[in-house]
Amino acid sequence: MVYMDYVSGCPVDERVIEVMLKYLKHPGNPSSVHSLGLEARNAVEQARNEVASLINADSSEIVFTSGATEANNLALIGYVMRNKSKGKHIVVSSIEHISIINTAKYLQKVGFDVSFVPVDSYGKVRIDELENSLRDDTILVSIQHANPEIGTIQDIEKIRDVVSASLHVDATASLGKIEVDVEKLGVDLLTISSNDIYGPRGVGGLYIRKGVRVNPIILGGGQEKGIRSGTENVAGIVGFGKAAEIAKQEWKGEAERLKKLRDKLINGLLKIEETFLNGHPKDRLPNNVSVRFNYVEGESILLSLDMENIQASTGSACTSKTLQPSHVLMALGLKHEEAHGSVLFTLGKENDEKDVNYVLEKVPKIIERLRMMSPLYRR
Ligand code: PMP
């Protein structure tokens, strides 16, 4: 198996599983006053410290959620509901994850104004367009740190310079791959997720800068300082904490290793005629290889790859239920058929040079065979 679909799911690190096991069996509820409750509370708070430390935040600024989707919903809905007396306009980029795009559309329906800012052909947010979209009543701007589908990294510090409203950044795709430092980025709210750093699924968090106020979107017993009710997912949170601790020590070395594999794979694939790179050539995630092959269809390539025991994807697994071409690829200005011919290889811990060589041996043959069958292809 050559698994190159880390964007859709990462294997949980063995060291993470080991610490989680104790809390899967542990009955303590962090809200209970007895000693087992206290033990669970301490484990959650230790995890909060580890997660905060990875992004250079204070632990009091982290709220645990069920993942990045919930954190993005909390950031947008929670922020605008709390701050709507200051304005009703928000700005998001046109290549945000679907959990931002659909939340922004929901806010439009309930009376907020939303501007969707375009990107250039590499997927960089057009800062001039962003500036033009800002209004006196803009209360929140939400721009992702990096795009999981095309790998493009945004210049958040430059964006921060032009935005005086609160700034939310979805760092799900960048955490553990490039530096994520809430002070350097100057963000007010930041979304993070556990599985993307080899922690368990179904856990994530929202960084909320001290002094920034958000309303809860899940109401109940007032856990997580009243911002996210519901009994804490103790084992999941403990796993997220361990994954953050490991990521802090290892991300730099791993990013350097992956960059070499990424560049070898990109260079090899681009040797196939009429093959192009999606996203930015330099400002891109160290593990992202998104390419498009003219005249062939991404889904057919994936099935052929799977028959050779290579797992990749065509884009976000979250939107694969719709047959629409990816909104991210369309926002780059690609034609429908170009977007449909795209394949995304995302590398991770278990990949090595042998894997890259194997993919580079198989892909040209697959593309050649599919093009021979394609009515669009003329030699
Ligand atoms: N934001 C980004 C940038 C993502 O890539 C994803 C998917 N991993 C999400 C949000 C949503 O994550 P989840 O499905 O874990 O809630």
Image (cartoon, helix red, strand yellow):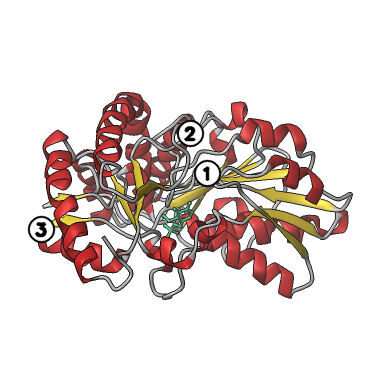
Q: Quadrant of ligand 1?
A: bottom left
Q: Nearer the viewer, mark 1 or mark 2?
A: 1
Using residue 332 as the reference point, say whether residue 325 is left or right of it.
left
Whole-number angstrom distance, CA of label 1 to CA of label 2: 9 Å
User: Nearer the N terminus, badge 2 or badge 3?
Assistant: 2
Three-letter amino acid code at disc 2? Asp
Decide: marks 3, 1 in contact (CB < 8 A)?
no
Decide: marks 2, 3 in contact (CB < 8 A)?
no
Decide: marks 1, 2 in contact (CB < 8 A)?
yes
Q: Position of residue 181 (x, y in %)?
A: 54, 30
Crowd around label 3: few <14 · some 14–19 · many ≥20 (10 Å):
some
Callout 3 secondary element: loop
Q: Position of residue 125 (x, y in %)?
A: 62, 44
Callout 1 secondary element: loop
Read off the residue under disc 2.
283
Is residue 362 depicted above or below 248 in this figure? below
Q: Position of residue 136 (x, y in %)?
A: 89, 49
Picture quarter containing residue 294?
bottom left
Q: Position of residue 301 (x, y in %)?
A: 24, 63
Whole-number angstrom distance, CA of label 3 to CA of label 1: 31 Å
Read off the residue under disc 3.
308
Crowd around label 1: few <14 · some 14–19 · many ≥20 (10 Å):
many
Three-letter amino acid code at disc 3? Glu
In the picture, which quadrant includes the C terminus?
bottom left
Read off the residue under disc 1.
122
Query: What is the number of callouts on the image?
Result: 3
Q: Nearer the viewer, residue 163 or 295?
A: 295
Three-letter amino acid code at disc 1? Tyr
